[in-house]
């Protein structure tokens, strides 16, 4: 088992990604093509992969789906790349998922929002604490997003109570809050950029002391995703500027047309490069034919992946 501190070291450097989850035409999980997807992505150099994460449609998975996704990921990637599993929803459900991920060989947990209901800082912190203490030997990264946002004071208290809470992934983009947390917590956490299409924010977050991020486009343009990450790491502004102008900003123009397209457009990209992961599950919707054509043109400009 990877210890929490070992996991912290792993996710403190390099590019991370969320593989999409493969479904057949009926929307049922396909382990064979999912395993093939992971085998294809693993050699490109991601530091760790998040199975059943946001881009992996965690919010749409049944309990048996979740078990099968995590098990397939850990078995396929054993000895190749560490697997972190998403866990979220109501506290007791999140605990069940975290413990199931541990049983199935995951190296760590990404704790996602509790969904729907708003909660106080004390309530969100209690939620995170209970999940952390349910898997004390596993490293946990908290995903700061939506209705599950923690401030520096809450994180500081949580850090004292939960030694295995080793990471903070920000999906909000509040610069004042991020600077406060980074300055307050120092090296206690590994810090990850987690805004949708994180490449657009990568340079700004690196300046804040958050050099690591997770890439959704790694699912269909892994070569370009790695090229962009290396350019960010090397302060190669010419390369990052060119890729932002020619791909990422036009890509955002498509993604921003509808709610939920942050996931749908990634599955669309996978389909266009011959790595079809099947449809998205409701309540997400597919891109239109016109949008697919626009995305296809952007991908073709990048060349072979």
Image: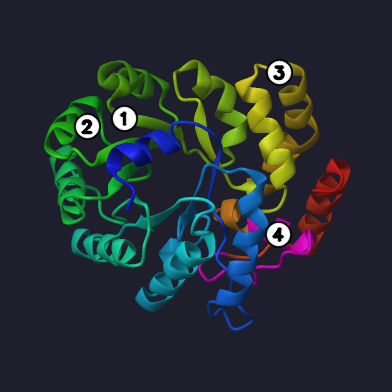
213 versus 279 height, above or below: above
Determine whether the residue tagged by mark 2 lies in a helix, strand or loop.
helix
Given contact means CB atoms under 8 Å apart, are the residues at marks 4 and 2 in contact? no
Which disc is residue 270 wearing? 4
Residue at image location 49% in from the left, 69% down from the top: 72
Residue, x 32% and y 53% (percent of image)? 1
Is 188 rendered above or below residue 140? Answer: above
Position in image of residue 247 (x %, y %): 76, 38
In the rendered image, residue 217, in percent from the top left (x then y), is placed at 65, 47
Of mark 2 and mark 1, the one earlier in the sequence is 2
In the rendered image, which residue does mark 2 sit on? 155
Question: Pointer 3: what residue?
Answer: 236
Give the image location of residue 105, x and y in percent: 36, 62
**Residue assigned mark 1:** 189
Q: Residue at x 76, y 24 (%)?
A: 239
Mark 4 and mark 3 lie on one chain; the one further toward the N terminus is 3
Instruction: Name the element at disc 4.
Output: helix
Q: CA distance from mark 4 to mark 3?
A: 27 Å
Provide the residue span drawn in magenta: 266-284
158 in the magenta segment: no
**Image marks 2 and 1: residues in contact by CB distance under 8 Å:** yes
Q: Secondary structure at mark 3?
A: loop
Mark 4–mark 1 Cα distance, whole angstroms, equals 33 Å
Label 1: state its secondary structure.
Answer: loop
Q: From the viewer's side, name the closer residue of 296 and 193.
A: 193
**Pointer 1 or 3: first along the chain:** 1
Q: Nearer the viewer, residue 109 or 118?
A: 109
Mark 3 or mark 2: whose residue is earlier in sequence:
2
In the image, residue 85 above or below residue 177: below
């Amino acid at each position: 088992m990877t210890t929490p501190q070992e996991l912290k070291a792993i996710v403190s450097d390099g590019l991370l990604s969320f593989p999409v989850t493969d479904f057949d035409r009926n929307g049922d999980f396909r382990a064979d093509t999912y395993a093939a997807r992971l085998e294809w992505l693993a050699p490109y150099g991601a530091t760790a992969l998040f199975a059943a994460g946001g881009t992996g449609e965690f919010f749409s998975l049944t309990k048996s789906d979740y078990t099968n996704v995590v098990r397939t990921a850990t078995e396929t990637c054993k000895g190749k790349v560490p697997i972190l599993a998403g866990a979220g929803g109501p506290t007791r459900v999140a605990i069940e998922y975290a413990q199931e991920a541990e049983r199935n060989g995951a190296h760590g947990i990404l704790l996602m929002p509790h969904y729907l209901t708003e909660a106080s800082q004390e309530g969100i912190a209690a939620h995170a604490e209970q999940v952390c203490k349910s898997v004390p030997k596993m490293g946990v990264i908290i995903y700061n997003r939506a209705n599950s946002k923690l401030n520096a004071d809450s994180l500081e208290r949580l850090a004292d109570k939960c030694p295995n809470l080793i990471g903070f992934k920000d999906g909000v983009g509040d610069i004042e809050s991020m600077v406060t947390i980074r300055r307050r917590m120092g090296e206690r956490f590994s810090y990850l950029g987690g805004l949708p299409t994180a490449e657009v924010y990568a340079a700004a977050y690196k300046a804040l002391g958050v050099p690591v991020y997770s890439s959704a486009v790694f699912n269909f343009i892994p070569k370009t995703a790695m090229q962009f990450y290396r350019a960010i790491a090397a302060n190669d502004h010419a390369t990052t500027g060119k890729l932002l102008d020619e791909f990422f900003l036009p890509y955002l123009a498509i993604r921003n047309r509808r709610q939920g397209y942050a996931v749908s457009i990634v599955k669309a990209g996978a389909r266009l490069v011959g790595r079809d992961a099947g449809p998205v599950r409701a309540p997400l919707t597919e891109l239109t034919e016109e949008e697919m054509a626009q995305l296809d043109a952007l991908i073709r400009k990048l060349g072979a992946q």
